[in-house]
Image (tube, rainbow, N blue to C red):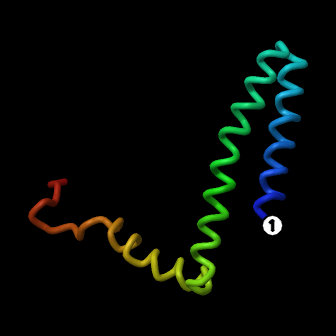
Amino acid sequence: MSALRALAGVALAAAAGGLLFGAVYAPKDGVLMAVFMLGCGVPVVIAAHLLVRRSAPAGSLRVKKTSDDVPTIISTLPPPMSTDNAVPP
C-alpha cells in the first residue's frame, strides 16, 4: 500500500470518528477528536512506511526476525537453579 493511500485512510477514519463523536457529544468535541485521531495516526503510518523502506534492502523479514529473536530468547531464560539455593521441604 502506498503512503498516500494509507494517509488518506487515516484521514478518512479520523473524519468519520470525529463526525460520530461530534454527533453523540458536541460538534467542538468531534473536531478535537478528529484532530487527535489524525495526530495519532499519521506518525504511526509514516513510521511504518519508513521501517518497511529501511528493511526492504536487508532481505527477507523471516530471516532477519529469526536471527534477531535468538539472543532475545536466550537472555530471557531463567538462570539454572543450583542446589545451594534450594528451599528445604
Identified by mark 1, the residue type is Met
- Residue 60 lies in what quarter of the image? bottom right
Front-most of 18 and 74?
18
Residue, x 30% and y 65% (percent of image)? 78
Residue 29 versus residue 52 in the image, above or below = above
Whole-percent x, y for residue 73 in the image:
41, 71
Residue 30 horizontal side relative to residue 39, left or right:
right
| Left or right, residue 25 beside residue 70 | right
55 is higher (above) or lower (below) than 63:
above
Q: How many numbered callouts? A: 1
Identify the residue at horizontal 64%, vertical 51% (top origin): 44
Residue placed farthest to the front in the image? 4
Relative image position of residue 31 (x, y in whole percent): 79, 24
Q: Work out which quarter of the rendered image holds the C terminus and state it.
A: bottom left
Residue 37 image-quadrant placement: top right
Q: Which quadrant, please, contains the N terminus?
A: bottom right
Q: Secondary structure at mark 1?
A: loop
Q: Which residue is mark 1?
A: 1
Q: Residue furthest left?
A: 84
Give residue 71's position: percent from left, percent from top: 37, 75
As drawn, the residue found furthest toward the top would be 26
Q: Nearer the viewer, residue 61 or 89?
A: 61
Q: Give the residue displayed 83% in from the left and 14% down from the top.
A: 25
Closest to the observer: 1 or 63? 1
Q: Residue at coordinates 61% horizontally, 57% vertically from top-left?
A: 47
